[in-house]
Image (cartoon, rainbow, N blue to C red):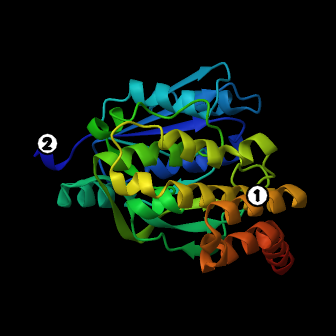
Amino acid sequence: MKHLTPKVSIVIPAYNHASYLKQAIESVLEQDYENLELIVLDDGSTDGTHELLEKYGGKFKWESHPNMGQSKTLNKGWSMAQGEILSYLSADDLLFPNAVSRSVESLLANPDAVLSYCDFDLIDPDSRVVRTVIAPEYSYTDMVTKFICAPGPGAFFWRTAFEKTGGWDPKIHRFPDIDCWLRLGLHGSFFHINQALAAFRVHDGSQSFSLTPVDRAEEAVRVITKFFELPNLPDELILSKPVALAHAHLLVAQLHLRSFRYLKAILELFEVIRLSPRSLIRLQAFRMLRNGLLNRAMHKLLWRIRQFRNR
């Protein structure tokens, strides 16, 4: 029955998230799938992460090493892993108890799929559910041309396909996952599980929610530019390069807005107009710009309301 229960390896890269790490670890240890390997790598934390891991003894593989960043840490973990199916979990996120079993089931039932992804709950710093995020149905064209990254927390992928991508690029800090998924999508489809199987935590210290430095905000354009330098891309993708670049600039504008760099955001919007004017009048553009202006403020307001109610 080994082929029905392939070994799954989950890597947790941990950097100064000791207050959340225990929940992440326990969410993996409580999975209902037995053939599971957990690897936790302390990436030079200074907040007690190492001491927390010591308490677990030999319950799973773990190591501490000098800080080298998320991508190098994950690549190291996946190179240590023995699983046929790989995954990762941020140290401040969670998996629900049936996340692994449902993901394995989906990958086995869909032989063309190289990756499965799920819906997920958005949770606040105190683990209360803010809302459930319904992930978009997979479209490789949309991922390339609209920078829509369907996989969030709870993504699982076949090792054989992942190794063809070369892993995560350590030079990409804000969008290493999208950068990798763009390459992985050239080797097969992604399967969407219409069920929340994970939780994504928003807090001031999370990379996705905190203010984004200029160089990291502008990575979206570098990621798309690098993708179109790959050899042997399908002709229809090559023709879509201007639209893809326009949406990358739109994402940069969103991140500049979220970080209160309004002039830079306006300059990025001029690039969108130059490359693909229609991209700016679509509903997605409105939603992205609205998110850039209001997302952080709205989440903080929700946290404060809930804290007031719980007094």
Provide the residue designation for mark 2. Answer: 2
Location of residue 266 in the rendering, given as x and y in whole percent from the top left corner: 83, 62
Residue 300 appears in which quarter of the rendering? Answer: bottom right
Determine whether, in the image, residue 281 is placed left or right of residue 203: left
Location of residue 207 in the rendering, given as x and y in whole percent from the top left corner: 71, 48
Q: Nearer the viewer, residue 242 or 255?
A: 242
Residue, x 76% and y 62% (percent of image)?
A: 270
Which numbered disc flags the more N-terminal residue, 1 or 2? 2
Determine whether, in the image, residue 249 is placed left or right of residue 293: left
Q: Is residue 231 above or below residue 67?
A: below
Q: Nearer the viewer, residue 43 or 21?
A: 43
Location of residue 261 in the rendering, given as x and y in whole percent from the top left corner: 88, 56
Q: Nearer the viewer, residue 260 or 235?
A: 235
Determine whether, in the image, residue 255 is placed left or right of residue 241: right
Element assignment for label 2: helix
The answer to whether residue 125 is visible is no
Mark 2 crowdedness (10 Å alpha carbons): few <14, some 14-19, many ≥20: few
The amino acid type found where label 1 is placed reads Glu
Provide the residue designation for mark 1. Answer: 268
